[in-house]
Amino acid sequence: MKRIYLDHAATTAVDREVVQTMMPYFTETYGNASSLHSFGRDAKNALDAGRRTVADALGAQANEIIFTSGGTESDNLALKGVGKGHIITSSIEHPAILNTCKYLTDLGCEVTYVPVDSEGMVDPGDVESAITDDTVLISVMHANNEIGTIQPISEIGSIAKDHGILFHTDAVQSFGKTEIDVQKMNIDLLSVSSHKIYGPKGVGALYIRKGAKIKPLMHGGGHELGMRASTENIPGIVGFAKAASLATERFESDTRHLTGLKDMLIAGVMDSIDDVILNGHPTERLPNNANLRFAFVEGESLLMHLDMKGIAVSTGSACSSASLDPSHVLLALGIAPEDIHGSIRFTLGRGNTESEIKYVLEVLPEIVGKLRAMSPLAGR
Amino acid sequence: MDYSEKVMDHFANPRNIGEIPDADGVGTVGNPACGDTTTVYIKVSDGRITDIKFKTFGCAAAIATASMATELALGKTLDEALAMSRNDVADALDGLPDVKMHCSNLAADALHAAIEDCLAK
Ligand SMILES: Cc1ncc(COP(=O)(O)O)c(C=O)c1O
Ligand code: FES
């Protein structure tokens, strides 16, 4: 059976060019970047080049980039590294932020969660009014992983700057899909991850603005400018950097391609199926995200039927989570729990084609119809 | 999620879907854990279930257990059907993942509610 992957917000396939670029760093250029001999110097050169590439993609300086094991570690480093005090964040952050905040609360930090509107947008005014004398950090994600809503990051950044507070943004989902410039957007700390942009898993970075005082999580041999001890993952970093430069290179064609497919999917679903609502913002959203709510059906069932047809998606339904809690993001939008049940996230990627979307549009109405026919909620 | 082949079969091709307009008993139960719903309709004659239908708004496990529960209950006496437990249904499906055991309550409880509704008439 042909399989169609529409879950690129979860992870992506590594680009073949990226794999090619990484290969020599496993078996030939395998030195430890801290070693003084030629093997070490070769590894150090690759590390430095990778740092410059990732910095360039963000409008940052090379010495402001710290390589980490991924988005989760970058988020942890940003939040825990700032030190004790009041943190302002949003109610729709990724668990990497929310659970770190919970941990910090247990340690005695105070955290304010600003709400979002029904389209998932944070009001910068809410952020500003939450600021107290003790506020040490504002952390609001750039684009949401479930609904794709893009936040007014520049505005929040300038509020933080005016008040002399550090501003962090989790850009794991937006990196490579929207314009990012840490200078223009007044960003002090920014998390990115490689495996969302066709790079290898287990690598990411935190941008730390020069002068921002952040304490490391990992203590040891003083790698990564003293910010993250442990021998650098050179193949991973080389692959991440290659993926980042490909994302920059292909930015316009990718954006055009993804937007086209996303619009085709949304319009096609709306045309062929009744009682469907688009979750998130109509325009301020990632070019590859279509999060749709199908009334009267449960998302896990819908997901499994699509899976039987070879189509991979994800859902915010309570039934699909181990905790049986519906998506905290969709709840924050004010959607009723029974409506959240029928939410399906389609996230498109560089490799998806029009014919794949056509196939989805062919099979989806029948699946939804079948589930609605057995739903006690339909036709009430 | 690791569902057994039987669960996948009953999920993909559920038996006894629908409603019985002139049912002798109807039972609707909501799942407090996740908020899903199952309704079971029965026709009874001489103390035996002669027809049974269901509707479910729920996950794959909820659909499969409702399908299996109706299949098991069809032809049983009301007492036999009342004695069916969620474990009976889960066992007949070659088991359910632990996190999905609560879904099998939905099917068994809705069946029992339909029988009680019938007996109360
Ligand atoms: C918004 C966001 N932040 C953080 C993460 C975690 O990134 P990683 O998987 O690289 O740890 C993810 C990935 O799921 C994400 O979508
Ligand atoms: S019915 Fe919701 S988890 Fe099974």
Image (cartoon, rainbow, N blue to C red):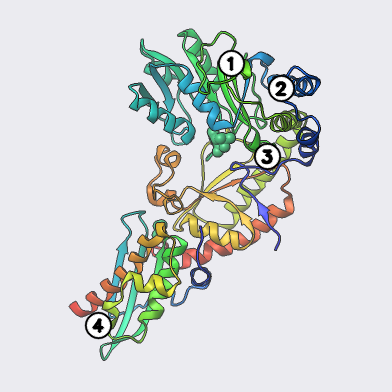
> Are the residues flagged by discs 3 and 1 from a single subunit?
yes
Q: Nearer the viewer, mark 3 or mark 1?
A: 1
Q: CA distance from mark 3 to mark 4?
A: 59 Å
Same chain letter for marks 4 and 2: no
Q: Reading the chain from its start, which is encountered first: label 2 or label 3?
A: 2
Query: Pointer 3: residues within 10 angstroms few (<14), some, or many (20+)?
Result: some
Residue depicted at x 59% and y 15%: A226
Residue under label 4, please give it. B79
Spot occupied by residue A236 in the image (x, y as percentages of width and height): 69, 33
- Where residue A68 sits, quadrant-wise, is top right
**B42 displayed left or right of A276:** left
Disc 1 with disc 2 on a shared chain: yes
Mark 4 and mark 2: Cα distance apart in space: 75 Å
Q: Which residue is mark 3?
A: A259
Q: Secondary structure at mark 1?
A: helix
Residue topped by disc 1: A226
